[in-house]
Image (spheres, rainbow, N blue to C red):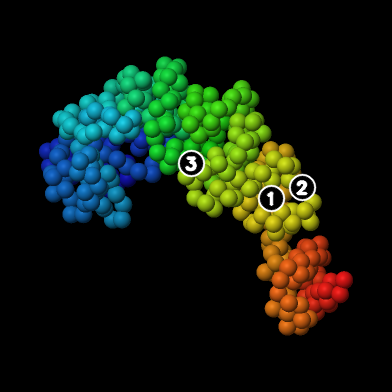
Amino acid sequence: MPGYVVQTLEKIEQCGYEAYIVGGCVRDALLGRRVHDWDAATSAPVEATEKMFPRTVLTGRKYGTVTVLTGGRKVEVTTYRADGEYTDSRHPEGVVFVSDIRTDLERRDFTMNAMAMDLRGELLDPFGGREDIAAGLIRCVGDPEKRFSEDALRMLRAVRFSAQLGFEIESGTLDALRGCAHLVSALSAERVRDETEKTIMSSRPEKLYTAFEAGLYDSYLGPSEIPAALGERLAVLSDMPFSRQVRWCGLCAVLTEEEVISDAADFLHRFRLDSRTVSAASRGCGIAVREMPEERLELKRILAAEGRDAAFCAAAVADALYGGSRVRSLKEIAGSGECVRRSDLAVSGADLRDELGIPPGTRMGDILQAIFEHVLAHPEDNTRKKLLKLAASLADD
């Protein structure tokens, strides 16, 4: 544990209470992974925890959580608790504060997240989390159907952990996941989006197949058959750049090719993704599945017509799916300083009006577009003198 975490637990113990690090930080420490967030559980009531430390933020009195601030870093400290009744397949109606750590661990989702460790390194593992980690298994604490019925997000978390850690979902847990899949429809699109994104951004995005096959995305896909080859096809996402837009584009491209979805933009909108990602990923998908060209001039035309985001999404996805070096070519084009937008032309509509007397309107637009097409193929001609001469000849035609 970092020193600031040790000091936090020591202070709580000095005040006569129990304190442990719990959950994901224990799991990641056992796995040798970097720990991003340190969470602690304590027998101390919220009010007592607040008084122990000079700087705290009451993160959630209802749930017994206080954030302890030490030198710009933080430890979330939560009083031992048991969850109340779940009525919306997501949140408990309330919590009941309890006096022992085992009861607190019992409410957690998976055995690997239901461990605690004290200052002296003693591990509390009442549900076999360490054994499941060693075996590479994701297993619910207690009855998996009950766990998923309480909080449907746990099903997507199981798939996400499987992708991030390379673990398999234990058979009984997987059976319950399939049986409770319909409960995902009660979750907010934002929650589903966030878990999905973490999965496709992992090194094993093919694990998402489990979620599709189990029916977790039925309300996002509409009527569709999930082909057995989808898992293998999804694996190609890990060959794509570590970019949100590219990975969403890649997911859409694979689902489109496998005839699981027919409209990438509609599919992405259902996750309430931001408009820029929807535009880049859906347009990039459309270009990529039409066999995006590799020729330099054609890539410039795509960059000009679709914009940087969509063009790079399409190039990255096409390279991963079909091979090639389109991304490298696009980067070279982007760094060359060549004209790839009409605004990069050495002349403007005002120049055509003032120098050649061409009035604004459709004819001027056609001439500017023709000039632009010429410059895409002949970037060395993008000078004011040459383009005014070209515009004059076009105007005379």
| Residue 327 circle label | 1
In space, the residues marked 2 and 1 are separated at their CA atoms by 11 Å
Residue situated furthest bottom in the rendering:
354
Query: Dot 1: what SS?
Result: helix
The residue under the point 69% across, 38% down is 321
Front in this rendered view, residue 93 or 55: 93
Q: Local crowd at mark 2 within 10 Å, few (<14), some, or many (≥20)?
A: some
Q: Which residue is mark 3?
A: 271
First along the sequence among labels 2 and 1:
2
In this picture, is 368 found above or below 181? below
Quarter of the image that includes the C terminus: bottom right
Nearer mark to the viewer, of 1 and 3: 3
Quarter of the image where one finds residue 24: top left
Mark found first going from the N terminus, 3 or 2: 3
Please tell me whether mark 2 or mark 1 is closer to you in this view: 2
Query: Quick one: quadrant of the N terminus?
Result: top left
Q: Residue 120 falls in which quadrant of the image?
A: top left
- Residue 121 pos. (x, y %): 29, 33
Label 1 is placed on what type of residue? Val
Provide residue 107's location: percent of width, then percent of height: 27, 27
Q: CA distance from mark 1 to mark 3?
A: 27 Å
Where residue 241 sits in the image (x, y, percent)? Answer: 60, 45
**Which kind of residue does numbered mark 3 sit on?**
Phe
* Label 2 residue SS: loop
Mark 3: give few (<14), some (14-19) or many (20+) Cα within 10 Å.
some
Q: Which mark is residue 293?
A: 2
- How far apart, in angstroms, are the residues tagged by discs 3 and 2? 30 Å
Q: Which mark is residue 72?
A: none
Depth check, front residue: 394 or 242: 394
- Whether pointer 2 and pointer 1 mark residues with C-beta atoms closer than 8 Å, the reply is no
Taking the image as shown, residue 128 lies to the left or right of residue 388, namely left
The amino acid sitting under disc 2 is: Pro
